Image (cartoon, coloured by chain):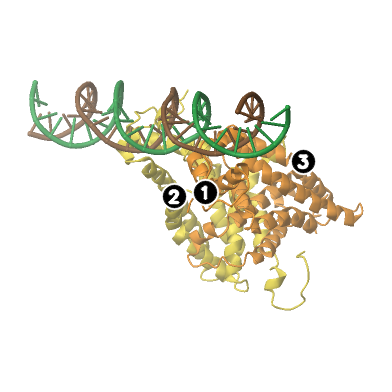
Chain colours: A orange, B yellow, C brown, D green
DNA sequence: ATCCTGTTCAAACGTTCGTTTGAATCATAC
DNA sequence: GTATGATTCAAACGAACGTTTGAACAGGAT
């Protein structure tokens, strides 16, 4: 079973990456041993160190492979909207849909392990592994900056710090959405986790509702301006 | 430094619990060794096994100690509101404030390690450790049921499944809010993480905006089909 | 056939893990 | 004081960890 689990991959490298991604998701980084990885991949124990150098380098590679693709798609989605807008500020809904829509699309891709990766990624923001977090920051820097700028333009009346926080909150909601029904089953024993198609509109409604919520009263310093940013 | 870090506690048991809670938060479960724990607690290595039996039992105890207090406070806050309402359905804002207000209050308590625990807890929903998750489910069952019932009454026109999902999303947002600025700094290098007082109204606005957002269109059986959800 | 380069393999490396042991120490009651 | 039970301690246990080693194997190019 363990050997057969690995995708029938052409080369050893890819088999290791696939097995590692899956196991990291299931057990976490620390609890996943090299012997588990090589066992599931059906390769020799030394293969990881030969092809990647170390376990840490393998972790980094698992992330890089997917994250670059994910962020490339995110930027592409944003740029597509910006091209349509012709210089005008984008609607917040378009920006949010570009970022989180791409995320959920990858999360829905169970075929090529995208779902596995997204659940792993969601847990990683708050995970303590130092060098993974730093690597994540570097890979995310440009993308987040671009999306934040788009949001700043879209919501000029909202303090930037507030937008930053709300984006943070949205990331949390998405993370749990993708971590998905495992956590939900904790609450509601009998839960229907079928039909992940519905997740996207569900989450999008929630995110936009949160993003466009009235500002906390104390932030509305002087004026009564506060109109729902739409 | 390592010995002095431990709170000057009367008995060995409490010193171990404090050190373990802090270290689990910082490094995760697997990456925290017994020697790290006993080292920081300033007790003998064998003390953990003597007082708790095993590392797993210690983890469980770390959770139980705090979680029971947290959930007790949550229920108390809910019941206080219900007493005021005199049988009438509660406003969603009151329910959300009861649950997440108590959570953030504990998260703000850096004095007694509450902040440490909440960050640990936030990561744990999506963490893979099997028996921790199961334990979490048991401890949460009653509280979540009570809050969900309150929300069902408060929002009778919203499908229950939708409320469940949105509660799930809210938990995610809260988790990231508490995990806090560490993750935020990944995005915005220069970030002002001072003044956690502002976090509560910030988060509350976002959560309520998400909870009360319009339902995704496809859930509104009333025709007018369209493309992407605005 | 030979050399070279890339890859796989079984075996072992030293380290750290959670746990156990048995003696030493403490507190309390007799 | 001495006996008794609870706690602490230094030391060691076997197992699992990530990594390294050196030989074996593959397939071209010369």
Quick one: quadrant of the C terminus of chain B? bottom right
Q: Real-space Cα distance between discs 3 and 2?
A: 36 Å
In the shown orientation, is residue B206 left or right of residue B70? right
In the shown orientation, is residue A73 left or right of residue A87? left
A31 relative to B84, above or below: above
Callout 3 environment at 10 Å: few (<14), some (14 to 19), or many (20+)? Answer: some
Corner quadrant of residue A56: top right
> Dot 3 falls on which chain?
A
* Mark 3 residue element: helix
Question: Which residue is found at the position 52% from the left and 53% from the top?
Answer: A4
Q: Is residue B80 visible?
A: no
Corner quadrant of residue B159: bottom right
Tag 3 residue: A142
Question: Which residue is found at the position 53% from the left and 41% from the top?
Answer: A29
Tag 2 residue: B132
Look at the numbered discs 2 and 1 and tell me whether their residues touch, using CB distance below 8 Å: yes
Tag 1 residue: B127
Q: Real-space Cα distance between discs 2 and 1?
A: 9 Å
Q: Which mark is residue A112?
A: none
- Same chain for mark 1 and mark 3? The answer is no
- Same chain for mark 3 and mark 2? The answer is no
Callout 1 environment at 10 Å: few (<14), some (14 to 19), or many (20+)? Answer: many
In the shown orientation, is residue B125 left or right of residue C17? right
A109 relative to B189, above or below: below
B164 relative to A143, above or below: below
């Amino acid at each position: 079973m363990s050997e057969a689990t690995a995708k029938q991959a052409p080369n050893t490298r890819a088999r290791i990456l696939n097995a590692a991604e899956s196991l990291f998701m299931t057990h976490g980084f620390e609890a996943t041993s090299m012997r588990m990885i090589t066992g599931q991949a059906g390769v020799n124990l030394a293969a990881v160190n030969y092809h990647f150098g170390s376990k840490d380098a393998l972790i980094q590679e698992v992330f890089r492979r997917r994250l670059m693709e994910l962020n490339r798609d995110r930027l592409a989605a944003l740029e597509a909207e910006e091209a349509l807008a012709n210089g005008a500020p984008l609607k917040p809904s378009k920006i949010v849909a570009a970022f989180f829509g791409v995320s959920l699309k990858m999360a829905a891709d169970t075929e090529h392990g995208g779902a596995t990766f997204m659940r792993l990624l969601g847990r990683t923001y708050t995970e303590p592994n130092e060098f993974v977090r730093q690597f994540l920051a570097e890979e995310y820097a440009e993308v987040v900056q671009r999306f934040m700028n788009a949001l700043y333009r879209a919501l000029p009346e909202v303090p930037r710090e507030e937008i930053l926080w709300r984006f943070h909150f949205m990331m949390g909601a998405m993370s749990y959405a993708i971590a998905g029904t495992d956590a939900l089953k904790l609450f509601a024993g009998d839960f229907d986790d079928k039909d992940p198609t519905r997740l996207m509109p569900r989450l999008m409604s929630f995110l936009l509702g949160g993003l466009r919520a009235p500002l906390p009263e104390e932030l509305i310093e002087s004026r009564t301006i506060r109109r729902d940013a739409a």
